[in-house]
Image (cartoon, helix red, strand yellow):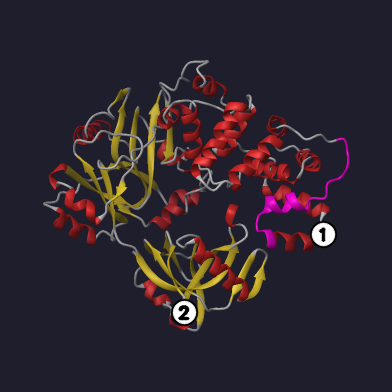
């Protein structure tokens, strides 16, 4: 466990991507099975322990530390794992520092047993602060070390002399601690078999279309289709098994059973997951009611019915058609759709256009109907995993903006845990500020340091880790759309808000009013 702690510390405090990759590759090369596999699972969200949750950690520390002292410490540090690792008063005893495998094996065997809290307390007693920190991150699943699952797999693939797409192709046929995967990457075993299973295939992605790109492109070489305001998904079905994957390869079928249960074919399809009412695509806010849930309620299934709008076909049965050009794949998709008529799915239409000016005019009206903008795809482009420059472009509509007043600030995570970097902002409704959104990016490190000082100097109240501030700092907030939301005090919710500009020059009283946002609402 101490070695795993050194890895986590290294990843947290190494700022560069390449430095993090080298640390991971050294781990894969020098740590034996199964420890290296358990670390890989932790960094790719492949571990979950039923009986070990943040609430258990909080209860344990409150049994040993004065609650007020813990509250002050948590407020100052801003991260549960870091706070507990530093404040934990270890009790002497026969406990020996556990290995990574010791922890994983014990928690997997214990399930929801009432022994779990005592086991964790014993491990915390035996470990130094860095080991406690790594232990808590491991068992709660909130690693936050600056390594996405994709980057972790990229480091693994480069270490094994393979492409990350090859690793992705077999990933869902494997289980932690990935002994077969390491054997393949080290040349000690065959490629793990994923054929005949409903596995994930890495998607093809698009580059943002810049003004300079348009002049160099031939409009007759491209096909256009709408970019719908949902989430990109992949439907994979083979050998009686059906799965629904997010763009990053997470299996989200449990949250959308009505999609998976209606699959009665063998194919791999690329599309957009949307909420649709009577043939009309609902705003993204409706889909958001279903996201990040393990299981939907009957009410959610009824009020927010999901379906997939298809863009492309990757496999027709066992036939891999990714090497075909886009026009041929589109014809194959249309023929497949006419033959199969899959329930809960429809085709995303192609958008005919006579030239770039005509397409720009169509894009200008794209804010209606849950459309984010346009996709441009070369007619001769094969379906290639990743983001190659040139074959596909996304031409999103311009963002909306509104001037909002900072209301609350909270500490960030990881390297931002010492700064107030998560912001809640509002607009005026009469003489009252009402919150309309939250954002935690869109500013430089220098700007963050200045905002942090302002927050500390203008705090008027505290609620645990959250600081309320006086109405004096204005943000220009950019967002994609705004929708009505009964869950919010203001009655509205922003889609993808981010800080566009910090208006140090603007008095808070001159910020926008709620009516300004309400006029932007998508019906």
- The residue at 33%/35% (across/down) is 269
- CA gap between label 2 and label 1 equals 41 Å
Please give the name of the residue rendered at 54% of the width and 32% of the height, measured from the top-left corner: 25
Which label was assigned to residue 66? 1
Residue with the mark numbered 2: 429
Secondary structure of the residue carrying numbered label 1? loop
Number of marks present in the image shown? 2
Q: Is residue 224 left or right of residue 30?
A: left
Mark number displayed over residue 101: none
Q: Nearer the viewer, residue 388 or 239?
A: 388
Q: Earlier in the sequence, mark 2 or mark 1?
A: 1
Q: Which quadrant of the view contains residue 492?
A: bottom left
Residue 506 falls within the magenta-colored stretch: no
Quarter of the rendering occupied by the C terminus: bottom left
* Residue 46 visible, this orientation: no
Place of residue 58 in the rendered image (x, y in percent of width and height, measured from the top left):
73, 52
| Residue 273 screen position, x and y as percent | 37, 45
Above or below for 161 versus 310: above
Camera-nearest label, 2 or 1: 1
Give the percent coordinates (x, y) of residue 180: 54, 21
Q: Give whichever of 61, 126 is nearer the camera.
A: 126
**In the rendered view, would you say 233 is above or below 485?**
above
**Residue 81, visible in the rendered structure:** yes
Q: Which residues are magenta?
A: 76-94
Magenta stretch containing residue 81, yes or no? yes
Q: Label 1: few (<14), some or many (≥20) within 10 Å?
A: few
């Amino acid at each position: 466990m101490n070695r795993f702690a050194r890895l986590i510390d290294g990843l947290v405090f190494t700022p560069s991507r390449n430095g993090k990759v080298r640390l991971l590759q050294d781990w894969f090369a020098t740590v034996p099975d199964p420890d290296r596999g358990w670390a890989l699972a932790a960094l790719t969200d492949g571990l979950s322990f039923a009986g070990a949750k943040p609430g258990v950690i909080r209860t344990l520390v409150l049994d040993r530390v004065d609650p007020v002292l813990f509250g002050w410490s948590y407020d100052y540090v801003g991260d549960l794992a870091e706070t507990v690792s530093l404040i934990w008063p270890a009790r002497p005893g026969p406990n020996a520092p556990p290995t990574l495998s010791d922890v994983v094996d014990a928690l997997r065997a214990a399930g929801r047993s009432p022994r779990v809290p005592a086991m964790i307390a014993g491990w915390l007693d035996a470990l130094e602060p860095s080991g406690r920190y790594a232990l808590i991150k491991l068992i709660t699943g909130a690693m936050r070390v600056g390594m996405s699952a994709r980057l972790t797999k990229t480091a693994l693939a480069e270490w094994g002399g393979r492409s990350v797409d090859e690793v992705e192709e077999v990933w869902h046929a494997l289980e932690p601690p990935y002994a077969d995967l390491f054997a393949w990457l080290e040349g000690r075993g065959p490629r793990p078999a994923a054929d005949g299973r409903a596995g994930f295939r890495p998607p093809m992605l698009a580059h943002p279309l810049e003004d300079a790109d348009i002049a160099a492109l031939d409009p007759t070489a491209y096909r256009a289709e709408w970019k719908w305001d949902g989430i990109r998904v992949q439907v994979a079905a083979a050998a009686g098994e059906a799965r629904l994957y997010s763009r990053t390869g997470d299996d989200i079928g449990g949250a959308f059973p009505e999609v998976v249960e209606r699959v009665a074919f063998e194919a791999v399809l690329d599309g957009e997951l949307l909420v649709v009412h009577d043939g009309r695509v609902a705003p993204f806010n409706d889909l958001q009611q279903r996201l990040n849930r393990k299981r939907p309620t009957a009410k959610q299934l009824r009020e927010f019915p999901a379906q997939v709008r298809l863009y492309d076909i990757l496999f027709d049965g066992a036939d891999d058609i990714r090497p075909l050009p886009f026009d041929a794949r589109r014809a194959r998709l249309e023929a497949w759709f006419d033959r199969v008529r899959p329930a809960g799915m429809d085709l995303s239409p192609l958008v005919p256009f006579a030239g770039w000016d005509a397409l720009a005019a169509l894009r200008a009206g794209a804010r209606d109907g849950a459309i984010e903008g346009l996709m441009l795809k070369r007619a001769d482009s094969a379906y290639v995993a990743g983001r190659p420059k040139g074959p596909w472009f996304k031409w999103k509509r311009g963002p909306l903006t509104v001037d909002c007043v900072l209301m609350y600030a909270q500490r960030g995570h990881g390297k931002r845990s010492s700064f107030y970097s998560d912001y809640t902002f509002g607009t005026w409704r009469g003489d009252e500020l009402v919150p309309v959104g939250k954002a935690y990016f869109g500013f430089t490190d220098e700007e963050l340091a200045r905002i942090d000082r302002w927050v500390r100097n203008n705090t008027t109240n505290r609620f645990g880790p959250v600081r309320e501030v006086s109405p004096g700092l204005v943000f220009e907030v950019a967002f994609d759309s705004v929708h009505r939301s009964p869950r919010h005090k203001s009655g509205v919710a922003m889609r993808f808000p981010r800080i566009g500009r910090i208006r140090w020059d603007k008095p808070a009283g001159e910020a926008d009013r709620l009516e300004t946002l309400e006029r932007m609402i998508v019906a």
